Image (tube, grey):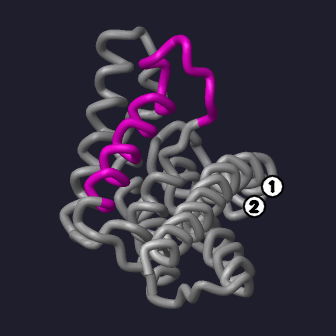
Amino acid sequence: MIKLSPGAQLAVGIALVALMAMTRGQHFASVNLPSASWAVFFLAGVLLSPRWVFPALFVEASLLDFAAIEWQGVSSYCMSPAYWMLVPAYGSLWFGGRMYARLHRDHLSSLALLAGVVVLSAFVCYLFSGGGFLFFSGRYPDPSLAQLAERIGVYYPRYLGNLALYVGTAAVLFAGLRAWSAQREGARA
């Protein structure tokens, strides 16, 4: 199980909020990274204990979207009744992170478990977000499961790749910080 000190959770929380702000939309023109939103929700589930973090991150994401549309000229095409499907979409990532945190052990074998949970929670997230947009946005006159399957083939790999990039980077940082901390503890003893 992963348990971080309150100070470490605060630092991680600030980093996740900043990461989403820097990568969601075009808020920082000099930062050209893929959106980290999916990873932020997953990693918050893994590393942050308070339950209020999920709604706070959703509010941040929504405010960033609103700001991009209102003040930065981003298209409002994705704004529709389907936008609310992002709640269960991001919730599946957050829940997947919570589940992984409970199952995590400081062993290399945890990486396979992490990969499986990431793939599964990302798939459920895409079903809610992409499927929700297809069926509830009003943008598609005759949505079908065949269209959803086609869209999964086109879009899911990119979303999964972005998620894997950020979660993999976080896993390397986490392992490095744990090793560094253990080395410091050993030197003190």
Q: From the top left corner, tell me how far across and down residue 173 is, in percent.
A: 59, 57
Residue at (31, 10) in percent of width and height: 71
Residue designated by label 2? 149
Q: Within the image, what quadrant is residue 8 found in?
A: bottom left
Q: Are marks 1 and 2 in contact (CB under 8 Å)?
A: yes
How many other residues sit within 10 Å of disc 2, few (<14), some (14-19) or many (≥20)?
few
Judged left or right of residue 188, residue 167 is right
Q: Give the residue pinned by disc 1.
A: 153
Q: Foreground: 107 or 132? A: 107
Up/down of 74 relative to 35, above or below: above
C-alpha distance separating marks 1 and 2:
6 Å
Taking the spot 45% from the left edge, 38% from the top edge, the residue there is: 19
Q: Which quadrant: the C terminus?
A: bottom left
For the N terminus, the image quarter is bottom left
Dot 2 amino acid type? Ala
Q: Is residue 147 visible?
A: no
Q: Does the magenta portion include 25?
A: yes
Give, as a three-letter code, the residue at label 1: Gly
| Residue 139 forms part of the magenta stretch | no
Residues in magenta, as a range: 8-34
Of the pair 151 and 165, the residue shown nearer to us: 165
Please tell me which residue is depicted at 73% across the width and 82% down the height of the picture. Answer: 108
Q: Position of residue 130 (x, y in %)?
A: 58, 52
Q: Residue furthest left?
A: 52
Density class for disc 1 (Cα within 10 Å; few <14, some 14-19, many ≥20) is few
